Image: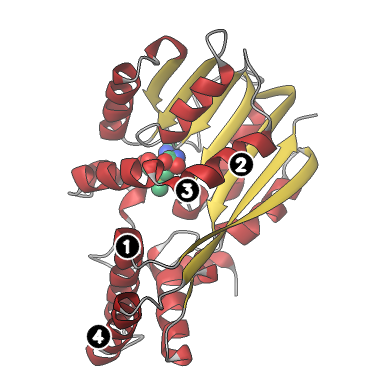
């Protein structure tokens, strides 16, 4: 079965909001999630390791694709310094507005420019940037090859293209009922995200476009606390599994209550894999 067949059955009424932020009816919540996750120390640490792996140098001209509220764009702007420049693009006009406001608030507007654009058809000439990056975007787009082709097109010769994304099927929680837990996570991966396997598919995509010296850095995000982030993952995954008919309401409640009890008793464990891939434009 192909990736498209796996991911093609997204559910009516429970679409992945990151594919159409402006019409999702929940823009404020999405802005909050991006900034809250952006500020969380565990994810900030992974981001920093990714940017070290990528090699962001002072004076670089960088494109951040699917920039959202600009969490990565602002980080990169600090790395490139006053001589550098970062352009953030996103499909969502509302997120671009918020990203511009936050960059200004943090005194970075001189080295950042935000504009709306579709990652599949970038409004830049060939070979415009030293570095082109995308964080947590490929899991929300169906045609990763087209987008990676665009990223490669706008990178200069000798420049770098890099993608950072998670892989939904690598979500691990220490639930008691293994078979039930597998059904819920698989449904969440295949029926909610456009490309739930984006993380593991990145290396293969990089091999299909004209990029050289491709390398992969795997990173793990783990937690022993059932905080807001994991509660949201558990809630959404179980809701998807109910709506797709993979589990009954009773099974979903049992799974959630089991994990909540483990959280209360200090026994919760959750983790997921992220993958960073980078390549050089010939
Ligand atoms: C989960 S958010 C990640 C945002 C940001 N990169 C970060 O790491 O904080 C995914 C972003 O991809 C954007 N997006 C989805 N499809 C897109 C497309 N075809 N072109 C440009 N942006 C897109 C969404 O609007 C959203 O801002």
Q: Earlier in the sequence, mark 3 or mark 2?
A: 3
The quadrant holding residue 56 is: top right
Which label number is shown at residue 43? 3
Which label number is shown at residue 253? 4
- Disc 3 + disc 2, Cβ < 8 Å: no
Measured as percent of width and height from the top left, residue 270 is found at: 46, 70
- In this rendering, position of residue 189 left or right of residue 251: right
Residue in the picture at 37% in, 75% down: 266
Numbered disc 2: secondary structure: helix
Q: Quadrant of the C terminus?
A: top right
The quadrant holding residue 193 is: bottom left
Q: CA distance from mark 4 to mark 3?
A: 29 Å
Q: Earlier in the sequence, mark 3 or mark 1?
A: 3
Depth check: give the residue in front, 226 or 7: 226
Check mark 4 vs ligand 1: CB closer than 8 Å? yes or no: no
Disc nearest the viewer among 4 and 3: 3
> Is residue 93 positioned above or below 140 on the image?
above
Check mark 3 vs ligand 1: CB closer than 8 Å? yes or no: no
Q: CA distance from mark 3 to mark 1?
A: 14 Å
- In this rendering, position of residue 179 left or right of residue 21: right
Which label number is shown at residue 227? 1
Q: Residues within 10 Å of mark 2 (few under 14, many from 20)?
A: many
Residue in the picture at 43% in, 29% down: 89
- In this rendering, position of residue 184 left or right of residue 149: left
Q: Earlier in the sequence, mark 4 or mark 3?
A: 3
Disc nearest the viewer among 2 and 1: 1
């Amino acid at each position: 079965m192909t990736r498209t067949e796996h991911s093609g059955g997204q559910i009516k009424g429970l679409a992945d909001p990151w594919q159409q932020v402006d019409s999702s009816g929940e823009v404020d919540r999405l802005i909050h999630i991006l900034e809250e996750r952006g500020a969380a120390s565990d994810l900030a640490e992974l981001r920093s390791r990714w940017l070290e792996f990528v090699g962001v140098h002072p004076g670089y001209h960088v494109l951040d694709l699917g920039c959202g509220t600009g969490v990565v764009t602002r980080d990169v702007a600090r790395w490139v310094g006053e001589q550098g420049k970062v352009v953030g693009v996103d499909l969502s006009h509302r997120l671009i507005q918020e990203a511009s406001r936050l960059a200004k608030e943090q005194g970075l507007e001189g080295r950042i420019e935000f504009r709306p654009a579709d990652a599949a058809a970038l409004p830049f000439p060939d070979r415009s940037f030293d570095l082109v990056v995308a964080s947590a975007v490929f899991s929300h787009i169906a045609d990763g090859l087209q987008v990676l082709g665009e990223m490669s097109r706008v990178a200069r010769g000798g420049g770098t293209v890099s993608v950072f994304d998670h892989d939904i099927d690598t979500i691990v929680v220490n639930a008691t009922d293994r078979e039930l837990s597998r059904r819920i996570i698989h449904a969440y991966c295949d029926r909610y995200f456009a490309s739930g396997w984006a993380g593991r598919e990145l290396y293969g995509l990089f091999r299909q476009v004209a990029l050289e010296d491709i390398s992969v850095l795997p990173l793990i995000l783990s937690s022993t606390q059932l905080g807001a982030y994991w509660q949201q993952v558990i809630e959404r995954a179980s809701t998807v599994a109910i709506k797709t008919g993979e589990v009954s309401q009773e099974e979903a409640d049992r799974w959630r209550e089991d994990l909540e009890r483990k959280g209360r008793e200090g026994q919760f464990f959750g983790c997921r894999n992220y993958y960073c891939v980078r390549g050089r434009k010939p």
